[in-house]
Amino acid sequence: MSAQTGSRRERQRRATLEEIHAAARKLLTEKGSAAVTINAVAREVGMSGPALYHYYAGHDELVGAVTADFFSELAAAMEQARDALHDAPVDDRILAVCRAMRAWAIGHPAEFGWIFASPIAAPNRNPDSQRHQAGRRFEKILLELTVELWRQRPFAAPEPDSLPASLREQLTAYAASIGGQLPPGAAHVFLTCWTRLYGLLCMEVLHQLDFAYSDLEPVFEECLRDISGLLGLRHTAGADGA
């Protein structure tokens, strides 16, 4: 096979993969996650179910690839917000990234809900898989900014001995998994902020708070003020002055 022929086939394969991913996304946004099956996606792109197995070994592999797309899009939106303020204090970059995350989530509720149902790291997950790598890219954005903040201006963090033994052991293991960039107490503060932020967004996107709120932006900004307090950030208002 000539290099030119191989290159052409590779381009055709990439184009088909993009079409498959677009079809899966269309089914997800229009009909829900249960509609994203091998046969349904194959029908959308005009091929048979068995033919799609030439591209993906099965449903799990297809789901992993599409999830990687969504993680990458979300991460790119957060990185763009961060990089637009590359000369600004880390405080401003952290808040900008958090707001960019919410903007993407509420603009892509089906995709964010799909991500929510797909853990970034799970037992026996291939660390070289697209989903794992894209999830790690997303996960590291706020972590790296928090590490930068910690190195510049350490925030108040509990002493490990003051924490319950089980929590202390888990935080020590997590701190080691990130190369000791944060000590266990600071890792606890970071994870507390992360769970508050991510948890609120998941509840908003999944409409779990519709019984009480029609507009959650002020609630989100209140959450950012709480996070700012934990991290010692200089909180700045959002675009609407919240």
Image (cartoon, rainbow, N blue to C red):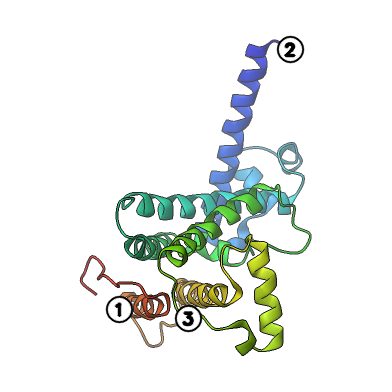
Q: What residue do we see at 71% from left, 47% from top?
A: 128
Which of the numbered marks, if any, corresponds to residue 1?
A: 2
Q: How many discs appear?
A: 3
Q: Which mark is residue 156?
A: none
Local packing at callout 3 (Cα closer than 10 Å; few below 14, some 14-19, many 20+) is few
Q: Position of residue 114 (x, y in %)?
A: 57, 62
Q: CA distance from mark 1 to mark 2?
A: 60 Å
Q: SS at mark 1?
A: helix
Which residue matches tag 1?
A: 218
Query: From the viewer's perspective, is residue 41 above or below residue 46?
Result: below
Q: Label 3 sits on what residue type?
A: Gln
Q: Are marks 3 and 1 in contact (CB under 8 Å)?
A: no
Return the residue at label 3: 208
Instruction: Give amino acid for label 2.
Output: Met
User: At 31% across and 53% down in the image, what residue appears?
Assistant: 85
Instruction: Give the residue at x 67% y 37%.
Output: 47
Is residue 10 among the parts visible in the rendering?
yes
Kindly indicate the quadrant of the structure image that contains residue 93: bottom left
> Going by the image, does 51 lie left or right of 162?
right
Tell me the SS state at disc 3. Answer: loop
In the rendered image, which quarter contains the C terminus? bottom left
Q: Where's residue 27, x and y in %?
A: 55, 54
Classed neighbour count for the residue bearing mark 2: other residues with Cα under 10 Å, few (<14), some (14–19), many (≥20): few
